[in-house]
């Protein structure tokens, strides 16, 4: 017999926020890996890589996403290390 556990509203919200947090964090890390592959490809083809962003709004958004990706990576790394013990 399968018992369905009814989730409370707070538990559902908590679950949705966790899924959103992990989806956003993993997409930031995936984007960073993709960008790194593009940079290495350009360095391999041309010998150098140069990028300039003139729009301050986009630059600020990229910096915020980079900080979030770094924080998410540290969070997941600590969680992994704790699971090994």
Image (spheres, helix red, strand yellow):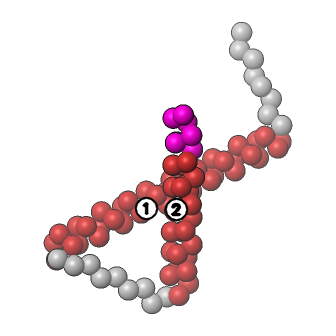
Stretch of the chain drawn in magenta: 79-85
Q: Where is residue 81 in the image (x, y as percent from the top left)?
A: 52, 42
Q: Position of residue 50 (x, y in %)?
A: 30, 82
1 vs 50: above or below: above
Q: Residue at 66% across / 48% down in the picture?
A: 18
User: Disc 2 vs disc 1: Cβ atoms closer than 8 Å?
Assistant: yes
Q: Where is residue 22 in the image (x, y as percent from the top left)?
A: 58, 50
Label 2 crowd bin: few (<14), some (14–19), many (20+), radius 10 Å: many
> How far is mark 2 from mark 1, CA to CA?
9 Å
Q: Residue at 23% across / 72% down in the picture?
A: 42
Disc assigned to residue 31: 1
Q: In which quarter of the image is the C terminus?
A: top right
Q: Is residue 42 rendered to the left or right of residue 3?
A: left
Mark 2 or 1, nearer chain start: 1
Q: Is residue 48 rendered to the left or right of residue 59?
A: left
Disc assigned to residue 49: none
Q: Position of residue 44 (x, y in %)?
A: 17, 69
Q: Is residue 28 rendered to the left or right of residue 44?
A: right
């Amino acid at each position: 017999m399968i018992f369905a556990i009814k989730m409370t509203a707070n538990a559902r919200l908590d679950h949705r926020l966790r899924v959103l947090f992990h989806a956003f964090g993993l997409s930031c890390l995936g984007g960073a890996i993709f960008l790194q592959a593009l940079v290495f490809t350009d360095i391999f083809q041309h010998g150098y890589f140069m990028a300039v962003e003139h729009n301050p709004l986009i630059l600020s958004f990229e910096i915020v996403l980079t900080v979030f990706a770094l924080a998410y990576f540290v969070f997941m790394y600590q969680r992994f290390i704790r699971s090994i013990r």
